[in-house]
Image (tube, rainbow, N blue to C red):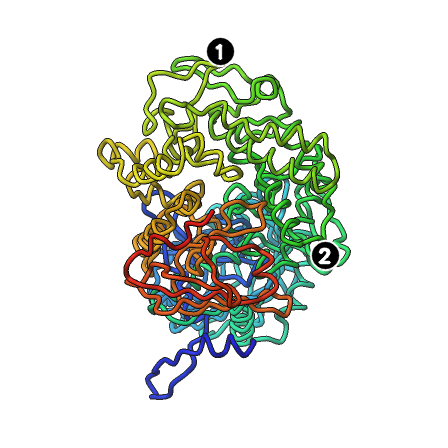
Amino acid sequence: MNIIGILLVTCFVQVESGISMEKQPIDYVNPYMGNISHLLVPTYPTIHLPNSMLRVYPQRRDFTKIRLNGLPLVVTSHRGRSAFSLTPFQGNENDLKPVSALSYDQEKLTPYSYSVYLDDQNIQVDYGLSHQSAAYDFKFERDEPLYLVLNSKNGKMSWDGDAIIGYQLIKNNTKVYLYLVPEEKPNQVEVLKDGSLIDEISTEGKDACIVLKYPKGTKNLNMKYGISFIDEAQARANMEREVSGKTVGDLQSIGRKIWNEALEKITIEGGTDDERTVFYTSLYRCFERPVCISEDGRYYSAFDGTVHEDYGRPFYTDDWIWDSYRAHHPLRILIDSEKEEDILHSFILMAEQMDNFWMPTFPEITGDSRRMNSNHGVASVLDAYRKGLKNFDLEKAYMASKLAITEKTLAPWSGKPAGKLERFYKKHGYLPALRKGEKETIPEVHSHERRQPVAVTLGTSYDQWCLSQIAGELGKSKESEYFGKASFNYRNLFNKETKFFHPRDKKGKFIEPFDYVFSGGAGARDYYSENNGWIYRWDVQHNIPDLINLMGGNDSFVRNLDSMFTEPLGCSKRAFYAQLPDHTGNVGQFSMANEPSLHIPYLYNYAGQPWKTQKRLRTLLAEWFRNDLMGVPGDEDGGGMSSFVVFSAMGFYPVTPGLPEYTIGSPLFKHVSVDLGNGKIFEIIAHNASGENKYIQSATLNGDKLDKPQITHDVIINGGKIVFEMGPRANKSWGISK
């Protein structure tokens, strides 16, 4: 930890003994923040080390459930369920089940530790983990025989005399392997099948269960295990490398140190205790994905079903790029640039390993699920390259992105080759919408999806701008010109009368009648995606000046922004959310709960009224991101939304990934120090910053006057200092320079 970091994070807390102890960044993390959702998916209190393969969290449907579905051993994907479960049990063996519902109390959870009391069973459980291995400690209070039930929900489990070995089959022929060693040998091992114990030591199929039996009087049990996506032998090697000779307490101490090193990349001073908690909890969630699945120099790739050598470069997967390209990847460029290079290198390897050389869109442990729309991996490639990251093959990245955008269908949630829709797009510059009652006949469109023609047209315009920029970097002038022209395709759906992006049919006519709140069916997917026309009105990240011109200039642009924040839902909340369940966190028609909204509050900066950006951001952060169980307004998506909080609290944001610049918001803390990993520090100082003093009065950058709401990446990455004078009233003349 650097000296500046020590100075900034020093905060003393009083403990019962009366001794003051330093409060470190990890102590501000609250994994329970957002565990009750406003409507759809909550956050999960995930226990893991930064970007590591092994992740667990309490197995329950949601936070309010009063029973655990066994104890977890490994969660194989973000928001997934445990691949194996473990149930400690004392009682009548006729009551044994593959997974038991466990009453619990006194749960204590941090990013690196877990403790819970199973009060029906009178069992104390403690847990610590490493990157690919972990350990459980059990303390039994009853003087009864006890059982440990290990369950693979779809796989194989065996006892080899020393350990339980096995696997669980997950999606796409991918297996997660387990090697688990109880430090105290059982006196008997049996198989649980159809509710009965059988004198066997191996079982296979659905709910494959091994039961370890221990005699009356056993009070303590300890077990260690490793996991692997390669095989059982590698799972054992991972366990022996990481946790052999270590206690649960040892693992927790090591994990705490690792987490502090990660979180101390950004240190803060000032703000309230809750604001610091929201900040560091958000930063913690930015380290949940993607995950490194390299194991001793090898990794299993579900993209081709093969084990590969990693040649000294970690392989990462589980990254929902539609969510993460906006702020999650840009944040990692600042504080973890080598890791970002390895992630982009992994994207290229995925493309090479798949049947078609297409950039992935939703790469997971089990391969690319091709969810959502567009192919925004190209934006992360361009953004990294423009910001000085070079340790990946730009030519290959360009080709994989180009082919994914020109040879793969543009239809959402589909991995099929291009067809009729793409030929239409290439000729006319937009995706055609279906009229009400018109049936889908295009085979590339997923059977459970819709065309999302406005969202796809706008997203593809941005992707083609990125292609144009990369082609220019590579000296491909003709391709740069071609894709540059195509990047204006959003204009083809702009309705000059309404100033909204409006779906057209195949004859070029706007769909009428039309309601920008409700038209589009469930999730507005007939035309948009998860959000309605009010959100997609601003989805031109790559050419905001042109969007301002289309709307009639700065004044009109600002009026339209204002109207979005004041436009009512138009119906009851019940009716609105029944149709648009992702469109939560509302302020008028603005939704704080979904990624396409994240850049919108910053758009006032581009039209000469940055004080409104400052006002909106502070209000949105205070209203929707709080240190409580409902403190996240929508699907957090493993860093997709949390990275917005991290950037916004620091005081700047990457509105356009691909441009090496940031737009300024309203710094929340009096002092922020960003360790850039290159031996340099970037500082943000906001004199008098508070909940009331949210408006920028003046600013300097490295001692020079700053009078525009923008800073370049070069200024940040070379180290330096930006100083803001903050006040309670808007200075409407600051930052209006173009």
Residue 262: quadrant of the picture: bottom right
The x, y position of residue 284, in whole percent, is: 48, 61
Seen from the viewer's position, the closer of residues 212 and 127 is 127
The x, y position of residue 457, in whole percent, is: 52, 28
Would you name the residue on which mark 1 appears? 507
Seen from the viewer's position, the closer of residues 288 and 192 is 288
Q: Which residue lies furthest to the left in this view?
A: 572
Seen from the viewer's position, the closer of residues 400 and 388 is 388
- Amino acid type of the residue that numbered disc 1 sits on in the rendered structure: Lys
Residue at image coords 43%, 22%: 503
The x, y position of residue 73, in whole percent, is: 52, 58
Mark 1 lies on a secondary structure that is: loop
Tell whether 538 sits left or right of 569: right
Is 497 above or below relative to 101? Answer: above
Residue 724: quadrant of the picture: bottom left
Seen from the viewer's position, the closer of residues 394 and 239 is 394
Mark with earlier residue (2, 1): 2
Is 428 above or below relative to 711? Answer: above
Crowd class of label 1 (few under 14; some 14 to 19; many from 20; radius 10 Å): few
Mark 2 lies on a secondary structure that is: loop
Would you name the residue on which mark 2 appears? 313
- Amino acid type of the residue that numbered disc 2 sits on in the rendered structure: Arg
